Image (cartoon, grey):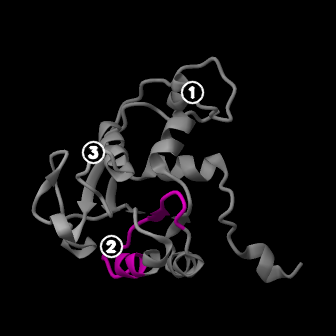
Amino acid sequence: MSEKAVSEPQHDTYPDSYIRAILDDVKTIAMVGASPNTVRPSYFVLKYMLSKGYKVFPINPGHAGKEILGQTVYASLADVPSPIDMVDIFRNSDAALAVTQEALQLSPLPKVIWMQLSVTNEEAAKLAEAAGVRVVMNRCPKIEYGRLSGEIGWTGVNSRTLSAKRPALKGGFQHRGLRKD
């Protein structure tokens, strides 16, 4: 195996420590493709992340100026009035490259480009990583937060973690702490 192949990031799996570090570090999220439709996955994720103490900026040009869950909707990432830690992409895989390119025009740069379940774009990932931005593809921050905190197990979903411990309440901006195992 060549040295280049070893050093390239693998986006099929992520260590829990990588995901946990992102979710602990991030405080502001721009959700590209947020929907006011209460049955859309982006609505559920927006509601959940807000409940965990994150500041979430919905991005949807068709709803710009309106509100979703009390949050002002913006037409583009450039319209968000404060720094963005994470760009959560609720668009298809083809659109992920353009969203990533837009995110890389921001100052300061976001810390993370997160592509939702079924969204993958290797070109976008390479572009972001070359700029020093962490990337997660084909994952949902709501599911990952619930899995790592233990909350997802309360509903009978296999969290891949066997423990009798309940998530601990934690100070700061998050409602529940992420376990450090």
In the image, 15: left or right of 108? right
| Image quadrant where residue 66 sits | bottom left
Q: Which mark is residue 38?
A: 3
- Mark 2 or mark 1: name the one nearer the start of the chain: 2
Query: Residue at coordinates 55% horizontally, 75% vertically from top-left?
Result: 121
Q: Which mark is residue 29?
A: none
Q: Amino acid at mark 3?
A: Thr
- Measuring from the top left, give residue 87's x and y in whole percent: 38, 64
In the image, 7: left or right of 107? right
- Measuring from the top left, give residue 51's x and y in whole percent: 31, 37
What range of the chain is rendered magenta?
A: 98-119
- Whole-Å distance between the Cαs marked 2 and 1? 37 Å
In the image, 8: left or right of 26? right
In the image, 94: left or right of 106? right
- Measuring from the top left, give residue 110's x and y in whole percent: 39, 68
Q: Which residue is mark 2?
A: 108
- Mark 3 or mark 1: name the one nearer the start of the chain: 3
Q: Which residue is mark 1?
A: 153
Estimate how packed mark 3 is, as few (under 14), some (14 to 19) or many (20 or more) residues with alpha carbons within 10 Å. few
Q: Is residue 9 magenta?
A: no
Q: Is residue 102 magenta?
A: yes
Q: Amino acid at mark 2?
A: Pro
* Position of 24 relative to 135 (above/below): above
- Whole-Å distance between the Cαs marked 3 and 1? 24 Å
- Element assignment for label 3: loop
Q: Tell me whether the residue at label 2 lies in contact with that at label 1, contact meaning CB atoms closer than 8 angstroms.
A: no
